[in-house]
Amino acid sequence: MERQIVLNDFTQTFSDLENVISLFKSENFNEVPFNDSWTPAQVVQHLILANENFAAILNGSTKETTRAIDEQLSRLKSLFLNFELKMKSPVFILPAIGPYDQQQQVEIISNIKNDCLNAITALDLSRTCLDFELPSFELLTRLEAIYFVIYHTQRHTRQLKEIAKFLKLY
């Protein structure tokens, strides 16, 4: 896969996230919109917790890959973009109740985006990451790890869009 495609996919995904976050006002950002839902702020915090160390993972220990570097992409995509599937968050990325400061979260998301874009631009995406393992997957290549971030972020961007739609924000 061409590096420019990866950069475009990553940039578009994070732009979509930032645009959806901007739909919320401070008065509804920390409010539970309906039963069994996180607040918009908790969804964003979950993404921060899940993504904040990915630039370090991409820049971390790697080894040469002995399989197709995109071998697990379709499985990642079918898992994280299956919106019929209800997932439980691992405890270590489970957001606290809050409240959260919307502007501060937007700044953190922007920093995560920029740090990852720098890694995508500079690194050999074919290498296998040794500092991160996704349960039920083998070690991910840098390319696959980036797409894990993309697909996971797209999943929760859709969740935020559904909340915004429910609140009649667009």
Image (tube, rainbow, N blue to C red):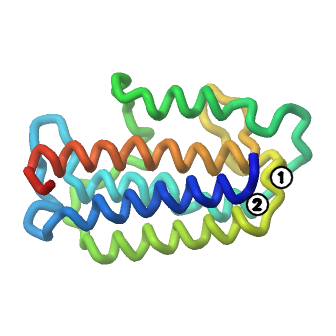
Q: Which residue is mark 1?
A: 62
* Quadrant the N terminus occupies: top right
Element type at mark 2: loop
Few, some or many residues within 10 Å of mark 2 (<14, 14–19, 20+)? few
**Amino acid at pointer 2:** Gly
Mark number displayed over residue 60:
2
Instruction: Note whether residue 130 is visible.
Output: no
Residue 170 position in % (x across, y down): 15, 54
Could you say whether the residue bearing mark 1 is in a helix, strand or loop?
strand
| Residue 150 seen in the figure | yes
Residue 78 location (% of width, % of height): 52, 27
* Residue 20 relative to residue 24: left or right: right
Q: Is residue 154 left or right of residue 128?
A: left
From the viewer's perspective, is 144 left or right of 16?
Answer: right
Query: What residue is shown at x 11% (from left), y 36% (from top)?
Result: 35
Q: Which residue is rendered at x = 62% and y = 65% of the image?
A: 116
Residue drawn at (53%, 62%) of the image: 11
**Most foreground residue, 86 or 161:** 161
- Alpha-carbon distance for marks 1 and 2? 6 Å
Q: Are marks 1 and 2 in contact (CB under 8 Å)?
A: yes
The relative height of residue 110 versus residue 163 in the rendered view (above or below) is: below
